[in-house]
Amino acid sequence: MSNNKFETNAIRTQMERSEFLEHSTPLHLTSSFIFEDAEDMRASFAEEKQRNIYSRFTNPNTSEFVDKMCKLEGAENGYAFATGMAAVFSTFAALLNAGDHIVSARSVFGSTHTLFTKFLPKWHIETSYFKVDEVDQIESLIQPNTKILYLESPTNPAVDILDLELLGKIAKKHNLIYIIDNCFATSYLQNPIKFGADLVIHSATKLIDGQGRVLGGVTVGRADLIREIYLFSRNTGPALSPFNAWILSKSLETLGVRVDRHCENALKVAEFLEVHDKVALVKYPFLKSHPQYDLAKKQMKLGGNVVAFEVNGGIEAGRQFLNHLKMLSLSANLGDTRSIATHPASTTHSKLSEADRLETGIADGLVRISVGLEHVDDIIDDLKQALKYV
Ligand SMILES: Cc1ncc(COP(=O)(O)O)c(C=O)c1O
């Protein structure tokens, strides 16, 4: 099956069928598994046998989800987590020692930023940041104790694009573990391992579930690193539940067709906003006006479903716009069938100083739209009427 295309792998990677020969994957809701005898139990714990012992370690449903994600990202192995942040935290906790150092971009997801600034320093792990338009500064930030280069592309919420291949070369030159949070693009649009990534992380809560139902996360990549992540996680308990794994594995079957339509709608929304007189700036990777348009075209199949734009008039204008939306949801999620609008300056990034916010590309009037799968004319009509109040 390994030569199959994305869509086929997303559908046909499945656990071994039981005696019932079920067509669709069954759900294995069990905390633990039984052993045939004492020797079977000993050999299983000694890892002489590859088998399920306890669902905090592995479960057929989580394994199916991980196997699919590995195929879709071209990874050797992986581990599935209860949330995207559990994946991010456990990956750092498993691989870093006190005194290690991380290099990352200014523009990362808010909770990842909080992990870098508030929690990892408790274990004397510090992070240095480069601005997304100052990639040439990275090498000056690398120290003898730097162990990880950690990035998102496209970034949340400013939708900037980083050169994954160039950064992969820098990581290799300095022997850094190169980790990409690929949740905005999904494995369908971009495979960071092709550009040298050692590990790829996803919040499966977003486009992988795609219907706003369950939380989940996954880290896939180099088998030696995943082994460390597995041992950490098996002993500390951030595992994905079998039920959520079952949902997420089924969701992957439709990821390609869903993301195609998300991207088609998002491009139309971006094109509408770009010529609107109440809109100061639109950021969408596949708009020619995006500062990294050529790069986006090189490393992504399509532009993704997130459009960021700035309304004229600052924070108040952003809030007014949100207050007048009739169909789009005001919600903290993204990647749902339902289109969602957020105003980062007054919500997810309100705890950052104004200077830090601007450095991260979050202007006061920035609005982030996660474009959903409603008819695009209805999405645009709602934006049009709400913009009248700005
Ligand atoms: C880029 C990115 N990474 C990680 C996360 C965290 O994922 P979760 O909410 O599943 O913990 C998010 C959530 O919005 C995100 O946008």
Image (tube, rainbow, N blue to C red):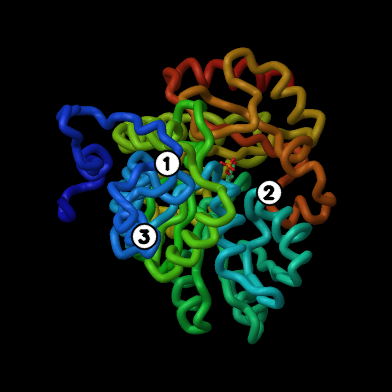
- Position of residue 369 measured from the top left corner of the image (x, y, whole percent): 58, 32
Residue 182 at least partly seen? no
| Amino acid marked by disc 2 | Ser
Mark 3: C-beta under 8 Å from nearest atom of ligand 1: no
Residue 111's tag is 2
- Density class for disc 1 (Cα within 10 Å; few <14, some 14-19, many ≥20) is some
Residue 323's tag is none
**What residue is pinned by disc 1?**
32
At horizontal 53% and vertical 25% (from top left) the residue drawn is 339
Q: Nearer the viewer, mark 3 or mark 1?
A: 3
- Position of residue 324 measured from the top left corner of the image (x, y, whole percent): 70, 16
**What residue is pinned by disc 3?**
42
Tell me if residue 60 comes above or below residue 165 in the rendering. above
Judged left or right of residue 22, residue 56 is right
- Position of residue 29 measured from the top left corner of the image (x, y, whole percent): 40, 31
Q: Nearer the viewer, mark 2 or mark 3?
A: 3
Give the CA distance from mark 1 to mark 2.
32 Å
At horizontal 68% and vertical 18% (from top left) the residue drawn is 388
Query: Dot 1: what SS?
Result: loop
Q: Say which label, 2 or 3, has the lower sequence index.
A: 3
